[in-house]
Image (cartoon, rainbow, N blue to C red):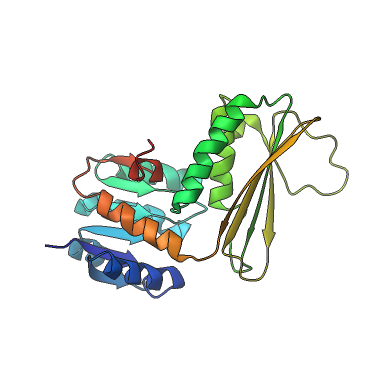
């Protein structure tokens, strides 16, 4: 018997790709919701639900997962602290994979970024993150860029909030703060996603870049996560766990 996978937001661009990848994986498409439709019925009909809709729906969808006991793969970006706390609370009752990015290469990028940050002291190496996405993207910096910032901060034994964020520089901003993590968000055209992490010192500069050329890589990763969730204990997981890296 194949796994039944539901898709929140099935009419959208990502929703259509997810439906195709569910079929490619040999799973059964249990159904999907469109804007404004009740997600509770989708959870009841599915063994796992994939949600790439919007940050504003994350809390309600996580609550639906917890109340029905159905696992959730959450790929919506731009969640605020309260929304993330709601997802974490739901994960005490049901397994949830919540990730800023479902591309395998990006998750390797995050792991490398953390290790590099641990080896390159903040006093000598400034960390800057530059990302570019299509003109329709509504949140900035991207969820992946924020995840990169958090990886750098972890490598340096701190948090992104404690390290400090430098973004939106304009006018006479003064000298760059030592240890702060910089962000620059570019928007234009139909760029799927580009992220560059720069460590800049007085004597050298190191740059790491990841480029996504097709949104399908996110759909493939999300379906992989949905299959991985079967039989898992309640908890909040990410793609490191799915890929065997955490």
Left or right of 75? Residue 110 is: right
The reply to whether residue 60 is in sight is no
The image quadrant where one finds the C terminus is top left
- Whether residue 72 is visible, yes or no, is yes
Residue 184 in the figure: left or right of residue 245: right
Locate residue 217, reporting x and y percent. 44, 61
Image x and y of residue 3, in percent:
19, 61
Farthest-out residue, right: 172
In the rendered image of this protein, does residue 165 appear above or below residue 22? above
Residue 212, position in %: x, y?
54, 59
Q: Quadrant of residue 244?
A: top left
Q: Residue at x 43, y 68 (%)?
A: 14
Q: How many marks?
A: 0
- Front-most of 241 and 157? 241
Foreground of the two, 231 or 246: 246
Please identify the quadrant where the N terminus is shown: bottom left
| Residue 153 pos. (x, y %) | 58, 32
- Residue nearest the observer in this picture, 100 or 124: 124
Name the residue at the left extreme: 1
Tell me if residue 126 comes above or below residue 78 in the rendering.
above
Is residue 146 depicted above or below 4 in this figure? Answer: above
Residue at point 69%, 58% (across, down)? 186
Question: Which residue is drawn at the image coordinates 42% and 55% (left, top)?
Answer: 75
With 108 as the anchor, is 38 left or right in this view? left
Question: 164 or 103, which lies in front?
Answer: 103
């Amino acid at each position: 018997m194949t796994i039944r996978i539901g898709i929140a937001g099935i009419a959208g661009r990502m929703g259509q790709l997810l439906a195709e990848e569910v079929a490619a994986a040999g799973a059964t498409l249990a159904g999907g919701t469109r804007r404004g439709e009740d997600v509770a019925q989708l959870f009841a009909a599915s063994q796992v639900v994939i949600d790439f809709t919007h940050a504003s729906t994350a809390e309600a969808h996580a609550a639906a997962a917890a109340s029905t006991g159905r696992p959730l793969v959450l790929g919506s970006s731009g969640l605020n602290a309260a929304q993330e706390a709601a997802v974490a609370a739901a994960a005490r009752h049901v397994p949830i994979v919540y990730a800023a990015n479902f591309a395998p290469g990006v998750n390797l990028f995050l792991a490398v970024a953390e290790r590099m940050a641990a080896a390159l002291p903040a006093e000598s190496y400034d960390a800057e993150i530059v990302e570019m996405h299509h003109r329709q993207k509504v949140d900035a910096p991207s969820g992946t860029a924020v995840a990169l910032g958090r990886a750098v901060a972890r490598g340096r034994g701190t948090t992104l909030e404690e390290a400090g964020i430098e973004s939106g520089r304009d006018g006479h901003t003064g000298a760059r703060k030592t240890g702060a993590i910089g962000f620059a968000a570019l928007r234009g055209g139909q760029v799927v996603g580009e992220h560059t992490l720069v460590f800049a010192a007085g004597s050298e500069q190191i740059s790491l870049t990841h480029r996504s050329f097709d949104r399908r890589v996110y759909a493939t990763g999300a379906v992989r996560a949905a299959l991985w969730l079967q039989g898992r204990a309640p908890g909040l997981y990410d793609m490191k766990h799915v890929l065997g890296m955490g």
